[in-house]
Image: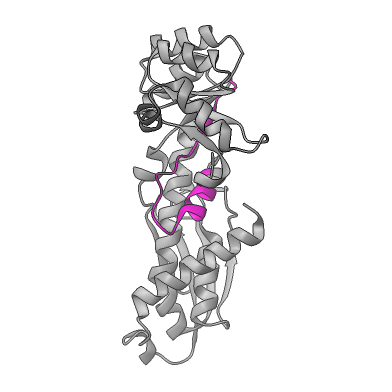
Amino acid sequence: MSARGYAEAARAAALAALAEDLAGYGDITGSAFPGDGLARVVAREAGVLSGTAAFAATAALVDPALLVEFRVADGGRFAGGDVIATVRGPLAAIFAAERTGLNFLARLSGVATLTAQYVAETAGTTARIAATRKTTPGLRALEKQAVVHGGGTPHRFGLFDGAMIKDNHVAAAGGVRAALALVRSGAAHVHAVEVEVDTLDQLDEALGAGASIVLLDNMDTPAVRAAVARVAGRALVEVSGGVRLDRVRELAEAGVDVISVGALTTRAPWLDLGLDMGA
């Protein structure tokens, strides 16, 4: 995604989130406070930062007079107790933006932090950690970018930018070869087609039909090793399905090219980040 597209997605997400929190009426409590103030975004635990665009967009939408200055960039690491950012401006606006802004930072930094842990397990191999389409509705652009901030790759953004034949497609077509023929008949020549397989027999069928990318779904490690040997460089090999952190190293060392992990977005913790008033 382009920088402009990401910024637009961050603004749209912030606008929707503020509509939930302020509902067109504003902050009944915070609006009672006159004058300006200074607040700090403080990490209560260590992590990898993501979500600065959404936080800044939240502040700007609440009141353009708010000045947000980040001391840590997206993808940067921080320790517990570190000041991540400062916010200056009208007190009422700081209070109105506080929770929505922190929600974005906590959620997206959690995704980036978990991704970084998965990426660390692939050190010394050529395997890459990738996200999936298991994202929070309305937040896909932000969560995919959080994976990038953690050192991973976003994979395809949606159904429109990559063809992937999955088990239900195979079932509907009556086989891997038939499904691949159907998809190729409607895809542009520049589109690679990935085929999901869950047995070595299906892998042979996909390779025989000329698949350039194969996804090994829910295979145990011995089967993954056997599949990589059988592919022998003829296709890019992705593995997915139940990929726990403690299994990443053995999968990476099995020789796969990509390890896609739904847990990066479905099981990422919210980091404990707070906003404290004062310098």
> In the displayed structure, does residue 5 sit left or right of residue 82?
right
> Would you place residue 248 above or below residue 227 in this image?
below
Indicate the quadrant where residue 219 lies: top left
Q: Residue at x 45, y 78 (%)?
A: 94
Residue 218 on image: x %, y %? 35, 23
Q: Which residues are magenta?
A: 125-147
> Would you place residue 80 above or below residue 56 in this image?
above
Instruction: Please indicate, yes or no, whether residue 279 appears anywhere in the rendered image.
Output: no
> Would you place residue 102 above or below residue 188 in this image?
below
- Residue lying at the far left of the rendered structure: 29
Indicate the quadrant where residue 186 lies: top right
- Residue lying at the far right of the rendered structure: 190
Q: Nearer the viewer, residue 77 or 54?
A: 54
Residue 182 on image: x %, y %? 50, 31
Residue 60 on image: x %, y %? 55, 76
Per the image, is 250 magenta?
Answer: no
Q: Residue at x 51, y 26 (%)?
A: 180
Q: Nearer the viewer, residue 244 or 164?
A: 164
Q: Residue at x 44, y 92 (%)?
A: 34
Q: Residue at x 48, y 20 (%)?
A: 177
